[in-house]
Image (spheres, helix red, strand yellow):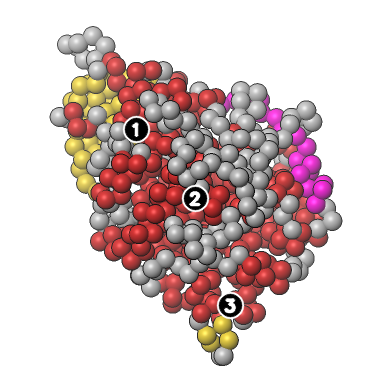
C-alpha cells in the first residue's frame, strides 16, 4: 500500500497516514528498509525516527548488549542526538522553542516506541528529560521555561528530582528543604538528597520538589511545597553521590544526589505551593502514560527476535513455531501485544483531545501505566516459554527485554498506585453517563492531524468527581456479533453491579488490597473499551478481535477472583460476583498465525 507523506528531509510534523489496522499491529523496524514490516515506514518517514533507527542499526545489538553488560554510559548516542537535535525535535513546545518546534503527540509516542525497540536504556534519558522539562513548563516561571527549552535545543538533558531514598513515591514525606536566605531577599538555601534520579550525571537542569521551611519551625508536613531548578554545573553545593546499579537499563544512569547549603536565586523557582504540587503530579500523569509506548517497543523487538528463532529452529523434523502449543502461545502473545497498541494509541486520542471540560484521559493514563505495562510482562512470559534457554542468552535483545519490561509496572509500586487511582473513577465511570460527550477523533486512523495540546501544560489532576463518561457499553455494541466480545460485555454488566453497587465489603485489615483489586477490575474494563473503539475505527478483522477479547475475558475473571479473595461477601454478593467470572470461547488460532506469517518481520538485528 502506498501513502502520500512528507519528504524524508521535512522537519514538519508528519500527518497521520490512514493505513487502517496495519500500523496498529506489532512492527519490526530496520533502518535500511529491507524487508521490514508493512507499516514501519509510517514511523520511519519522520526524520527524527529515521535517524534514530539509523544510529542503532549501525551500532547493532551486539554493541548495545556489551554496553548493557558493562553498564557503559552512552556518550556516543548523546553526541549524535545533540548533533541532530532529536530530543528537541519531539519535546520542544511552540511557545518556547527557538527552532520552530512543536510537541506533536503522535510523533513523540511513535518515536518513543521505536526508541524502546532499539534500546530502552538509551530511551530512558529522553523519558527523564521529558519529566524535568514538563515540570518546569507546568510551573509559572516563563523565563525558566525558555531556558529549559533552550537547554534541550542545544542538545542538553534534564532531570526530575522527586523521589527520596526513605520515602520513594510518598511525596508527602519529602525531606528536601529550602529556606529563605537571610542575607539576600528572595533567595533560597537548599538542603537535602534525592534518590533514583535519572540523568543525575549529565543533566544541565534538575527540577526538584522541596518543602519550604522557616528558621524556627523546621520541616513539617504542613510546610508548603516549592519546585526549584538546580543547575549542577554551576552549583558548588551539588554532589552526584553514586550510580545506583539496577536490574535493567544498565547503560542508563540512575543516581543518588545530595545538595548542601546551595543558593537558589529567585529566578530558579519554577512554582510554589499548590502549583508546585500540581506541576509534579501533572508531569507524572503524562510521563507514566508515555512509558507505555516503551513497553510496546520492547515487546515488538522481542517478538520479532523470538519469531525469527522459532521459524529457524528445527525440532523433531519441523520448525518449532509449527508445534501446536507453540503456535497457540505465540498467537496469544501477538494478540496481547496488538491489544497494547490498540489501547495506547486510542488513549493517545483522549490525551490529544484533553481539555478542562473533558479530562477522561486521567483514567486512561492510569490504566495505561497499570495495564499496558503488565500486559507487556505477559507477552514476555509467553514468548519466554516458547524460546526456552535461547531467551536467556546474554547476546540477545530478548534477554534484555525480559529484564527491562519488569521495571515499568514495578518501580515505586506504580502499578498499585495507578490501580488505586482507577478505583476513584468507579462511581463516575459506571454511574455518571453523559451521552453528549463526543468520542475523540483518531490520530492513527487519519481523522485528525496530530498537534500540540497547550492544555496539557496547565492541566491539573484533581476534582475526579467532576469527570463524566458516556455509556460504558457503547464501544462494544457494533462488535457484539463476535463471541468473546459478547462474553466480555456480560461480565462487565455483572462487574458493574458488584463494583458500583458497593456490594463488596472489604475486610478492615485488607481494605487497601481490596481497593487495588477494585481498580484492577475497572482497569480491565476500561482497557477493553478503548480496544473496542480502536478495533472499530481501524477495521481490525473479527477473528483478531475475538482473540484479543479472549484474553480480556480471562483477565477480568482473574481480577474478579482476586477481588473476591480480599472481601467478605454475603450470599447475594457472591451470586453477582460469579456472573463476572466466565470461560472464553475458542478462537481461530490459524487466523492469528497466518496474520503473523503475512507480516513476516525481518531477521533480527545482529
- The residue tagged with tag 3: helix, strand or loop? helix
Q: Earlier in the sequence, mark 1 or mark 2?
A: 2
Disc number lying in front (1 or 2): 2
Please state, as top left, top right, bottom left or bottom right, where the N terminus lies in the image.
Answer: bottom right
Residue 428 figure quarter = top right
The secondary structure that most of the magenta stretch takes on is: loop
Q: Are marks 1 and 2 in contact (CB under 8 Å)?
A: no
Compared across the picture, whether 481 is left or right of 132 comes to right
Residue 507 position in % (x across, y down): 61, 47
Residue lying at the far bottom in this picture: please name it. Answer: 316
The residue carrying mark 3 is: 321
At 77% across and 32% down in the image, what residue appears? 433
Q: Residue 568 at x, y = what percent?
A: 68, 50
Picture quadrant of residue 54: bottom left
Secondary structure of the residue carrying numbered label 1: helix
Within 10 Å of the Cα at label 3, are there few (<14), some (14-19), or many (20+) other Cα atoms?
A: many
Task: Check residue 591 for magenta coloring.
Answer: no
Q: Nearer the viewer, residue 318 or 205?
A: 318
- Which residue range is magenta in the image? 459-479
- Which residue is the extreme one toward the top? 185
From the viewer's perspective, tell me whether residue 235 is left or right of residue 18: left
Q: As rendered, which of 460 and 430 lies closer to the eye?
A: 460
**Quarter containing the C terminus:** bottom left
Mark 1 crowd level (few <14, some 14–19, many ≥20, 10 Å Cα): many
Answer few, some or many: residues within 10 Å of disc 2's Cα (few below 14, many 20 plus, some between 14 and 19). Answer: many
Give the percent coordinates (x, y) of residue 10: 47, 39
Frontmost of labels 3 and 2 is: 2
Residue at 44% in and 72% down: 391
Measured Cα–Cα span from mark 1 to mark 3? 47 Å
Query: Disc 2 on helix, strand or loop?
Result: helix
Residue 69 makes an appearance in the image:
no
Amino acid at each position: 500500500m502506498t501513502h502520500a507523506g512528507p519528504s524524508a528531509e521535512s522537519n514538519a510534523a508528519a500527518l497521520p497516514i490512514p493505513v487502517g489496522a496495519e500500523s496498529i499491529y506489532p512492527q519490526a523496524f530496520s533502518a535500511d528498509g529491507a524487508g521490514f514490516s508493512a507499516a514501519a515506514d509510517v514511523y520511519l518517514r519522520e526524520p527524527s525516527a529515521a535517524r534514530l533507527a539509523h544510529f542503532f542499526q549501525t551500532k547493532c545489538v551486539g554493541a548495545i548488549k556489551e554496553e548493557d553488560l558493562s553498564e557503559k554510559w552512552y556518550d556516543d548516542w548523546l553526541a549524535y542526538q545533540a548533533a541532530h537535535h532529536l530530543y528537541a525535535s519531539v519535546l520542544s513546545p511552540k511557545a518556547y522553542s527557538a527552532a520552530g518546534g512543536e510537541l506533536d503527540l503522535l510523533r513523540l509516542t511513535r518515536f518513543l516506541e521505536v526508541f524502546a525497540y532499539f534500546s530502552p536504556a538509551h530511551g530512558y534519558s529522553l523519558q527523564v528529560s521529558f519529566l524535568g522539562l514538563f515540570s518546569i513548563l507546568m510551573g509559572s516561571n516563563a523565563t525558566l521555561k525558555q531556558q529549559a527549552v533552550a537547554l534541550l535545543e542545544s542538545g542538553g538533558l534534564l532531570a526530575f528530582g522527586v523521589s527520596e531514598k526513605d520515602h520513594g513515591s510518598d511525596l508527602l514525606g519529602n525531606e528536601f528543604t529550602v529556606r529563605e536566605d537571610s542575607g539576600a531577599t528572595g533567595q533560597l538555601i537548599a538542603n537535602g538528597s534525592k534518590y533514583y534520579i535519572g540523568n543525575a550525571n549529565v543533566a544541565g537542569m534538575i527540577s526538584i520538589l522541596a518543602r519550604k521551611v522557616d528558621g524556627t519551625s523546621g520541616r513539617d508536613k504542613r510546610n508548603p511545597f516549592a519546585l526549584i531548578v538546580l543547575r549542577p554545573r554551576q552549583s558548588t553545593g551539588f554532589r552526584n553521590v553514586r550510580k545506583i546499579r539496577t536490574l535493567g537499563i544498565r547503560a542508563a544512569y540512575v543516581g543518588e544526589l545530595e545538595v548542601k547549603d546551595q543558593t537558589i536565586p529567585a529566578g530558579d523557582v519554577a512554582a510554589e505551593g499548590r502549583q508546585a504540587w500540581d506541576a509534579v503530579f501533572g508531569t507524572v500523569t503524562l510521563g507514566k502514560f508515555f512509558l507505555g509506548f516503551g513497553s510496546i517497543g520492547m515487546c515488538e523487538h522481542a517478538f520479532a527476535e523470538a519469531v525469527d528463532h522459532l521459524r529457524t529452529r528445527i525440532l523433531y523434523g519441523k520448525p518449532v513455531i509449527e508445534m501446536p502449543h507453540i503456535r497457540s502461545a505465540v498467537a496469544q502473545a501477538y494478540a496481547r501485544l496488538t491489544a497494547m497498541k490498540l489501547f495506547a494509541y486510542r488513549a493517545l486520542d483522549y490525551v490529544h483531545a484533553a481539555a478542562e471540560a473533558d479530562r477522561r484521559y486521567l483514567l486512561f493514563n492510569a490504566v495505561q501505566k497499570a495495564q499496558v505495562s503488565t500486559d507487556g510482562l505477559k507477552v514476555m512470559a509467553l514468548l519466554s516459554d516458547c524460546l526456552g534457554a535461547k531467551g536467556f542468552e546474554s547476546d540477545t535483545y530478548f534477554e534484555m527485554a525480559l529484564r527491562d519490561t519488569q521495571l515499568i509496572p514495578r518501580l515505586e509500586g506504580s502499578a498499585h498506585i495507578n490501580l488505586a487511582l482507577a478505583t476513584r473513577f468507579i462511581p463516575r465511570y459506571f454511574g455518571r453517563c453523559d451521552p453528549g460527550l463526543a468520542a475523540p477523533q483518531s490520530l492513527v486512523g487519519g481523522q485528525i492531524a496530530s498537534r500540540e495540546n497547550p492544555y496539557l501544560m496547565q492541566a491539573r489532576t484533581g476534582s475526579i468527581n467532576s469527570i463524566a463518561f458516556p455509556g460504558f457499553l457503547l464501544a462494544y455494541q457494533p462488535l457484539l456479533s463476535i463471541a468473546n466480545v459478547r462474553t466480555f460485555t456480560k461480565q462487565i454488566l455483572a462487574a458493574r453491579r458488584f463494583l458500583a453497587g458497593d456490594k463488596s465489603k472489604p475486610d478492615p485489615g485488607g481494605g487497601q488490597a481490596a481497593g487495588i483489586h477494585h481498580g484492577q477490575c475497572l482497569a480491565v474494563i476500561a482497557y477493553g473499551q478503548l480496544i473496542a473503539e480502536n478495533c472499530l475505527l481501524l477495521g481490525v478483522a473479527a477473528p483478531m478481535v475475538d482473540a484479543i477479547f479472549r484474553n480480556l475475558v480471562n483477565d477480568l475473571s482473574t481480577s474478579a477472583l482476586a477481588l473476591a479473595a480480599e472481601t467478605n461477601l454475603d450470599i447475594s454478593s457472591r451470586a453477582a460476583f460469579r456472573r463476572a467470572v466466565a470461560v472464553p470461547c475458542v478462537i481461530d488460532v490459524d487466523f492469528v498465525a497466518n496474520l503473523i506469517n503475512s507480516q513476516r518481520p525481518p531477521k533480527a538485528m545482529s
